[in-house]
Image (cartoon, rainbow, N blue to C red):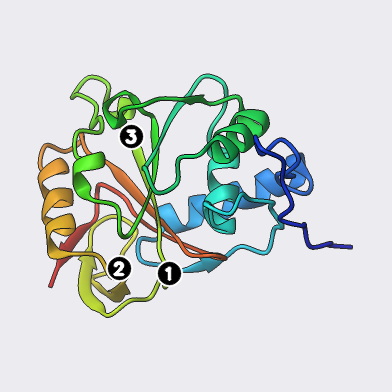
Amino acid sequence: MHTEFSSSQDARGMNIPGLQDPVHSSAEVFRVLAKVMSEPGTVEELTEICGHPDELLKAASAAILTLADMDTSLYLSSELDSPISRGFLTLHTGVKIVDSANQADFVIATQDTDISQYQDLPVGDPQYPDQSATLIIQVSNIRGSKKVTLNGPGIENIKQVQMPDLPDSFFSWRDMKNSLYPCGIDIIFASNTELMAIPRTTKLED
């Protein structure tokens, strides 16, 4: 039976539980992540319970606890960075928290984070495109007011979706980062309980 976790936490986030069942839950979260990555613009709800510090939303916490480990590095935007967040993430993943996005395998930011905080995140190189960063953006509403048309792998013909509310400069920045495919970045949008992804292979048109 599922039990809601309390948000009570000590000064370093060490009392905050992670995924309820680390083996089963991480497998389920990974399944959802694989689905949204392979079907760009598709919104999936996470049913797995995951504890989280106040700065991080449930879906973002579940995603990073599934993807990160002690061999990866993570940058937290200034809005999300705190001793509690660092303690929680380090405890449950072993991930190395870094102070610059250009050193990170994963970046967690919010829709209000200034792009300057993560504009230099790694895009890989032609020989090792997998050495790029994955950007997780916390959003208040995963279905925003920006209507775009998606096309590319995983999309039959075209798909029209409502994207989270981010400035046009963000989407211009994304296009620039992905202009040298296979180099680029993959983006995961996370609301409190939902996920949507826009991989580097997806083209966006207004």
Alpha carbon separation for disc pair 1 and 2: 28 Å
Q: Which amino acid, mark 2? A: Glu
Residue 185 percent across, percent down from the top left: 27, 41
In terms of secondary structure, where does tag 1 sit? loop
* Residue 118 appears in the figure: no
In the picture of the structure, the residue carrying the numbered disc 1 is: 140
Q: Residue at x 22, y 78 (%)?
A: 147
Image quarter where the N terminus lies is bottom right
Q: Which numbered tag is attached to residue 156?
A: 2
Image quarter where the C terminus lies is bottom left
Q: Could you say which quadrant of the image residue 196 lies in?
A: bottom left
Q: Which amino acid, mark 3? A: Ala
With respect to residue 7, does 129 lie above or below?
Answer: above
Q: Are marks 2 and 3 in contact (CB under 8 Å)?
A: no
With respect to residue 121, does 44 lie above or below?
Answer: below
Residue 91 percent across, percent down from the top left: 67, 30
* Residue 155 appears in the figure: yes
In terms of secondary structure, where does tag 2 sit? loop
In the picture of the structure, the residue carrying the numbered disc 3 is: 133
